[in-house]
Image (cartoon, rainbow, N blue to C red):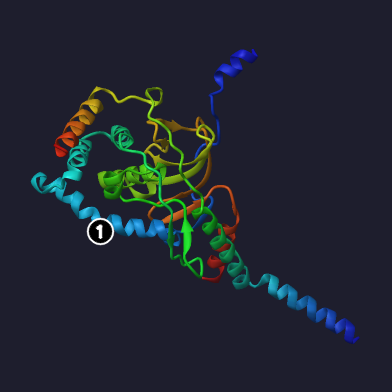
Amino acid sequence: MRTLLFVAACAITSIAWADDPSLVVKRESLEVKERIQKLELINVTARKAVSSESGNPDAELQAILDDIKALEASKTE
Amino acid sequence: MLAAWLAAVPAWAGDPYPFDDSGYLGDAVLLPDWSATMARQRAQSGNLESCLTNRERCPLLYRGLGHMLEKAAVLPPEKQIKLVNFYVNTKHYRDDRSARLETPLADGPVRYPSRWATVEEFLHRGGDCEDFATTKYFLLRQIGFDIDQLRIVVAFDREANNYHAVLAVKQDDGEVLLLDSNNGIRTGGRHPYRFIYSINEKSIWDHEGLPALSQITLNHEEKSA
């Protein structure tokens, strides 16, 4: 009888823990933190050269970019 | 038949970028370096504002940028995106230096291999791929794009065989553009990227791990509220 009561108490306790939202949230929060730490350690360094195959400005945008280039050149004089 | 099918398949094909709340991981402040970069950008934005209000007071570093923003203001959104992409891609590529930073996620300082840069820092010394994406983000925000239209996306680039960052822009019609540092603007699934995570000023999204965790957490928070 005692053994049966002990097993029943253990079962009820484990079910209560499993259903406790606060414990689940804590576990999930810890896993989210670990995941964010891993994401931050990714070394993001790809270098891709500008290519005319990837796209070229139309005449209007090219004129603006030329003006900018001239302004930026004048600042170094 | 096979030849026709192969010709129709793009050189790279992947899933379209999921510009939604799937994979929501948490608040942007959980990334300490990104959070600090946003604070520096806010502090430096006065220099940029002075260019737009008074050209004479415009710092030399910002003269070209001030002109670009002035011209962009009268363009339609599609051209604004292209102009910012072309403009930023003319800048110098420069490798990051790693740094040890305090983080709320660890007991002591952590060495970060990649650093985020503000517009001013990027114009001053150049940057690497995430700095190109970050600068495009801040400039499109300056032009008037909404936070919810923009995300900096970190991905593995099969074309470059390296980790890369691009800027995702959600247009008013729902189409998502991915702005690359090689001047490419990708749409739909025609891209070489395997998406890993994204950030903007508000949030972080995880595109490959813990797909259900945040949803479980949110569900519990909703229940307990």
Q: Is residue B219 visible?
A: no
Residue that sits furthest to the right in the current view: A1
Q: In this view, does B91 lie above or below B108?
A: above
Q: In this view, does B114 lie to the left or right of B220?
A: left
Residue B16 lies, in percent from the top left, at 51, 37
Within-10-Å neighbours for mark 1: few <14, some 14–19, many 20+? few
Residue position marked by numbered label 1 in the rendering: B43
Residue that sits furthest to the bottom in the current view: A2
Chain letter for the residue marked with disc 1 in the picture:
B
Q: In this view, does B129 lie above or below A36?
A: above
- Closer to us: B33 or A4: B33
Q: Is mark 1 on a helix, strand or loop?
A: helix
Residue B180 lies, in percent from the top left, at 41, 35
The residue depicted at 21 percent of the width and 37 percent of the height is B68
Q: Is residue B159 left or right of residue B132?
A: right
Residue A12 lies, in percent from the top left, at 76, 77
Residue A40 lies, in percent from the top left, at 49, 54
Instruction: Say which quarter of the image contains residue B186.
Output: top left
- Count the marks: how many? 1
The residue depicted at 37 percent of the width and 31 percent of the height is B183
> Which quadrant is the N terminus of chain B positioned in?
top right
- Closer to us: A20 or B100: B100
Callout 1 amino acid: Ala
The residue depicted at 60 percent of the width and 54 percent of the height is B210
Q: Is residue A15 above or below residue B69?
A: below
Q: Is residue B200 visible?
A: yes
